[in-house]
Every structure is written in C-alpha cells, then in structure tokens.
Image (cartoon, rainbow, N blue to C red):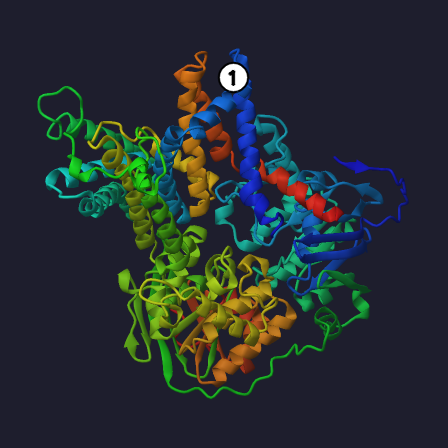
Amino acid sequence: MGSEGGQGRQETAAPAIELRGISKAFGPVQANRDISLAVARGTIHGIIGENGAGKSTLMSILYGFYRADSGEIFINGRRAEIHDSQDAIAAGIGMVFQHFKLVENFTVLENIILGAENGPLLRDSLADARRSLLTLAEEYELGVDPDARIEDLSVGHRQRVEILKALYRQADILILDEPTGVLTPSEADHLFRILRGLKEQGKTIILITHKLREIMDVTDTVSVMRRGEMLATVRTAETSPEDLAERMVGRKVLLQVDKRPASPGETVLKVENLKVVDEDGVARLKGVSFDLRAGEILGIAGVAGNGQSELLEVLGGYRPATGRITLNGHDLPLDGRLANGRARRAAGIAHVPEDRQSEGLVMEFAAWENIAFGYHHDPAYQKNALFMDNAAIQADTEGKMQRFDVRPPDPRLQAKSFSGGNQQKIVLAREIERNPDLLLVGQPTRGVDIGAIEFIHQRLIELRDAGKAILLVSVELEEIMSLADRIAVMFDGRIMGERLPADTDERDLGLLMAGVSNGANDGGEAA
Amino acid sequence: MEKMPRWADVALIPLINLALAFFFAGLVVLAIGENPFDMVRFMVKGALGSSNGIGYTLYYATNFIFTGLAFSVAMHARLFNIGGEGQAALGGLGTAVVLLAVPWPHWTVALPFAVLGAALFGAAWAAIPAWLQARRGSHIVITTIMFNFIGAALMIYLLNGILKKPGQQAAETRHFGDAVHLPTFHEMLAPLGIEFSKSAPANVSFILAILAAVCVWLLIWRTRIGYEIRAFGNSESATAYAGISAVRVTIIAMLISGGLAGMMAINVVMGESERLILNFTEGAGFMGIAVSLMGRNHPVGIVLAGLLFGMLNQGGFELLWEMPGISREMVFVIQALIIIFTGALVNMTRDPIERLFIRRNKGA
C-alpha cells in the first residue's frame, strides 16, 4: 500500500493531508509549482482557483493519476507513496468526480462493490454492502435504494452513490470535484448537509469548486490557487467572496454583470411545439415553444438533462425534431439532409455548444484548425478549388486569439493544451466573430475561471447590444439571473414557466426547476 | 502534452521495436540450431546486396506502400480497413479488365486507364462495407474481413471461368501483350548508364507509389475532405456539431482507401506478371496494416516502413537459399515476429521510453 512510516511523526494533531513542495510540469507548462498544503482532520477544506490554476492536477496527484515531479504527500502524518488509485484508496482517500464513474445498467449495490468484491462469488459482497449501505444511509442522510439501477436514478442520487462508494471503501478523506454543477439548489443544499454530517463523524473533506457562495457556505478553510501556485490558505470566516475572487484572479473582479436594460427588436427566432424523441424512444422535448427577439438574451434555466441539450442540438441542426422553427420569418428544416450544422451556420445561427471538449473543439487539432471548424467551407479559408489556405486560417486565428485574449496566443498549439477557459474563448471567438443573427450558447462558463467568466459575459452582452439574439442555456442560476433579459425554466422536456429576472428569485426558479408549477404567473408556455 | 522529442517518437521507437524483433527472431533461430548473426547477414545481403536484391526489395515495397497508404487513409477517419487484401485483389480484376478489353498501343496510354480501373474496382469493393458502416452501423472490421473472403471466392470463380485463358489448366488470364509492358528499373536506368538487374521485377509503379504518398499527404493535410476525415477520426461528436456528414466522410475515406489498395495491382498484375493470376496479392493487403502502424499513418513513415518491410520480405526469402536449416515456415515465423513487434506492438515500448525521457529531462 506504499506508505513508508519513515518520519514517524505520529501525533494526533497531524493533519489528515499534508502536501509538501509538490511540483508537476506538463512539458513547458508548470501545472503545480512547489505546492504545500495542510488540511486538518475533520474539516471541510475548499480549493478555489481559476481554471488551469492547477486544482485538478493537484487532486489527480493526490489520487494517483499523475505522479508529482517532486514533493511529498503525508496522510495522517505518515509519508505516502501514491502510484495509482489503489494506493489512494488504501490510504483512505475517496474521490467523487465531476463526471460520475458508474455503470449505468448495474444496480446501486453492484456499483458499490465494483472493484471491491471480496472473492469470486458476489453473494457475500452484496450482502455485506447492503448492510453497510443501510448504516451509512442512516448516519449521513445518504438514502438510496440499493436495488435501483443507476440509469433510473436522478443526478443527485447518482452522486450519493459515488459518495457511498468512497465511504464503503473506508475513505476518511473525501475529495469532491465541482460537485454541485449538476444539482438543483435544493439538491446542493442536501449535499452540503451530507458533507457537514460526514465532517461531524471526523471525515475530512476537500471541495473543489469555482462557486464562491459554496465556499462561503460550507467550508472551514479555503485555499486559493493561481497559475499553479498555492497563494494563500485562509479561514473561511475571515474572508469574503470579493476578497477570494480578487486573490484568484490577481485583480479586482466584477462579480455583478454590468449591463443596460435590453431594447428588444424584431422576433428573430420562433419555436413552436418542438418535440424530440431520442434513439431509445424516450421523449426529450414534449412541445417547447418560445420567441426570441433581436437584442435580447433568453435564458433557459433548469437542471441538466431536462431537454436543454436536445433543444440546442435541434436548433444547431444535428438532432431531428418535429414542430416548427422560424428564423427571421423563414422556416428552418427540422430533419433529413437539409438540417445540419453547416446549413444552420449559413442561415445565421452560431453555436457555442455545451460540451466544448466533445463538440465545440477537436481536442487533437491545433487552435487554428479549430478556428476553421464548422466554417471550413468559408471561401476565405480556401486557396483554390482543391486546397485549403492554412496560412490564411492561421493568420485569422492569430487575430481572433488576440481579440479574445486567448493564452498562450499560439495558433499551432493543440486545443487540449489550453486551459478550459482558453478553450472556451477559442470557441467563442470563432462563433461570435461570425456576427450571427442568433447565437446559441450552452453552459458558456462551465469549468471556466472567474476572470474568463467576466470576459465571456461582457462579450455576450456586447453581442446583445449589437442587436443580436442570444439563447443562453445554463445550469448556473446565478449566470442566468445576471445575464438573461427573460428566463424560461425547463423541466422534463417542457417549459415550466417564464419569468423576468426582476420578478423572480432563486427559490421561485428552483421550484420551477423541480417541476412545481404554481400557476400564478405562468403563461401559456407550460404544456 | 509533449513529453518526448519528436525524433524519438518517429525514429527511435521504431528502431527499438525492430531491434527487439530481431532479438526474438534471433532466439528462434538459435533454438533451431542456426546462427542468428548469419541470419541477419543473409537477410541484409539478400535484400540490399545486389541490384537484383534491391529490385525485389523495391518491388515488394511498392506493394506495401500502396496497401499501407490505403490503411492509413481509413485510419485517419478511425476506420479499421482490414479489407486491403480483397480490395487489392479486385484492383487486379480492374487492371485486367482494362488491359484485356482494349488493344492498347503503348503502356503510357494504358497506364492511366489501368490505374483508374484498379482504383475503381478496389474502391467499389470498399464501398459496400463503407455503406454498411455509415448507414447501418455494421462494423467495418467485420464487413471488410468478410469481403476479403468474398473477393477471394469471386476471383477463383472468374479466373476459372470467363477470364481463364482457353486451353490451359492454370487459373490465370492471357498475357496482356508486350505493348503494355511497364518499364522495369533495368530499362529505366539503362539510358542513364546504370546497370540494374534485368530479372528484378521492380518497375515504374514504384514511382507511382511515391506519387501516391505525396497525394495522400496533400489530401490529408491540405484539402477540406482531409480536414473532415481527420476531424471525424478524432471526434465523431464534434463533426456532428460542425455539420460534417459522418456518412459522407466514412464513404469517401473508404473509397480512397480501397482505391489505393487496388492500385497495388498495377505493380504486380501489370508490372510483374503481365497477366492476372490467382492470389497475386500474397498477403500484401494485410502487411499494409503493419506498415501503416509502424509508419504512424504518415505517408513519409509509410514509405520508409514499406521499404523496410520490402527488405524483410526479400531478405526472408533469400534465407531459404542461403540457410538450408531454415524452412519456408521458419521464414514466415521470423517475418511474423517482425510484424508483431514493429506493427502490432508499436505502442508497447512507447510508454517506458517516454518515462525515460521525462526522468532525463527532469534531471537536466
């Protein structure tokens, strides 16, 4: 299990985790530089920092995915050599990833024993897991039906299964990576209750997040990372969101978006009774209708997986649907060969997709190849009938990278070597500079640092003020509240209601997101 | 994440793999009581020691370059085209049909049409698996393998039926005629005053193969369809977003792949045997997979790997004459070892070497 008790400092006050001088470089990029950190047992410790600040790298080193170039890890005062996740688990570290690692068609119980079966026959392991599951459920409000299949569970419940998996493996130290990204506000509150319960039982929790509010709500201490360095570790009670934001970015940040009231013009996009049935025969959109006018941002709020992705895909031209979509008064084809991303771009729709890594970018492609992506038929990018003009694309990319402050501004670098925020800027530069009539934006700031969030929000507002229509889909209520001129809430493939930002609050929207329609000020949008 | 210098990636690792291959082949030779150093010596001498040997080496290399390029184009779209063997066989059919149908006045006139025939027939044989993959989701590996068998059966049927030269037993067509004889290296080099073996089969097709490699490079890295092929190969979900048709890319990549495989027939059928003979491909379609993998799916790498495999092929056959203790089967074992280490296990040595470099860089 790779722990060497050489130092032998076995005091009770030893921190649960202590990192000393951890450094890690990927080629020329110094992801972690001489990081030292101590987390006391029985506390909740937040790690906050811009994307690309090195939080994930640090946690990956702790969990054995990467090996540090130098530095030492101490668990409970004992030096630990963590070569892989098995070592990490043996050292009592459990990790809950942003993207759950569960087998969808297994039951909860089967998932929990996966990789921790004792013996070739499953009966004993399953019975054992069932017993511990009941105890854990009682102790920590972690109730989940052990025999339910993962695919039938809500996202919040799936996350509980991940936590249970870690606890079943006797984890004393729990690392959660951006755990609330997929949760409703009430699910997030429930998660925090669970975390506080775990803390009271003496567990140590590390919470990686970019949401300042969560840090303030739930952590005892917080560390700020910037550009691979650990800047400061402070007691949460002695800091403020503004202070943390400033430390993260290294300058004063506007947490509030600065924008004038919208002055909407003509209707740009009209969506009527849009219905989608997916490959498995499940209805994903059940009659969605809305209008979107020039010079306004319509925010679509909702918990992930309630049809927002499908809505974007239909509008982006790569998912068949029924119903009607008109753009500037012209019908858009909804299925068959006529509906595709290229035709939608030609019609004046640009699209910043929800998942930049699997859709918006080809990660193996260089930045300049990604700038042409989707627009590679553009005559400006062709040398002649036969060949593309790679030099022209690279020159164009240089300009776009400069205007969108993409760092490092090297068009030849592969997309995967940029941080999340800079990847997103590449996508935004490509889409916004096409000057579209309608911009579809999905999760524009997911996994993006505060500094870049500010920049991205300003660009969206600028586009709106230039008289363009923007459809903004985001699971971040704060983002919707601050950017949108109108808010529509989606639940289970329907629009539950529309609100103006001034007339609503998080509680009201949270109820709509949970599918509770109070009827009072809901228009005819809900089906 | 660049961790290793590029030269190590493209040159050092293949060389280490080759050394490993020879090491294990040497052990096998040792086990049957022969001298492994003799083996290497005879192989190198057989492949490069004479202009006759070189001529055979280039002849085999031509085949491997075509089939390697074929495999690589499909691979850039992440399509595993194992059907090179069948597509090459059908390419032979296309070549023969073109050359038999018209009384060609001269090879220069016939060659473009023969290339077209070979490529079209090869492409056609790739088209059905491509369509099945694109439209029906039938896995390309399965369908292309099956089409190898169907292709082989079709060739047997045709070469024992309407294509067979009347009044003989052998399953082959009549001779194409001296007018379409392709210049060999002997004939090409003679005007320059260079003496080259008269019996070696290497011919002008080798130049065609090099041209094909240049064209593949331009196609993949300079054209729009090449861009779409690479995008599709790297991220299928992203291509849907970008409005690149998966069906179109799949079919086009496979057509080009099949066409290149088919062009191998120009070298063998038109250039060497000057008639269509059953089983003329002799496994070159499969060898292309190893060639492409060793060449990292890059035309330059494929040309180099093709030359190397040509040497091994020729050198291996030479062993039969030079070392009586080594049987024909033994030669196949040695070649198979080399293919396994340089092709199939090409990634085996990469990880440890990469780690070595990281440690060294850290020390520096």
In the displayed structure image, the side of residue A426 where residue A341 appears, left or right? left
Residue A10 at x, y percent in the picture: 89, 42
Choose top left, top right, bottom left or bottom right for residue B180.
top left
Residue A464 in view of the camera: yes
Vertical order, B79 against A511 (above or below): above
The one of A269 and A409 positioned closer to us in this rendering: A409
Three-letter amino acid code of the residue under disc 1: Val
At 67% from the left and 38% from the top, the residue drawn is A86
Mark 1 sits on what residue? Answer: B29
Q: Label 1: chain?
A: B
In the displayed structure image, the side of residue B319 where residue B108 appears, left or right? left
The one of A67 and A202 positioned closer to us in this rendering: A67
At 53% from the left and 32% from the top, the residue drawn is B18
Question: Total of numbered circles in the picture?
Answer: 1
Residue A122 at x, y percent in the picture: 57, 29
Residue B352 at x, y percent in the picture: 63, 38
Residue A280 in view of the camera: no
At 40% from the left and 27% from the top, the residue drawn is B314
Find numbered disc 1 in the image and state the secondary structure of the residue it sits on.
Answer: helix
Furthest-front residue in this view: B193
Vertical order, A374 against B155 (above or below): below
The one of B363 and A313 positioned closer to us in this rendering: B363
Residue A235 at x, y percent in the picture: 81, 64
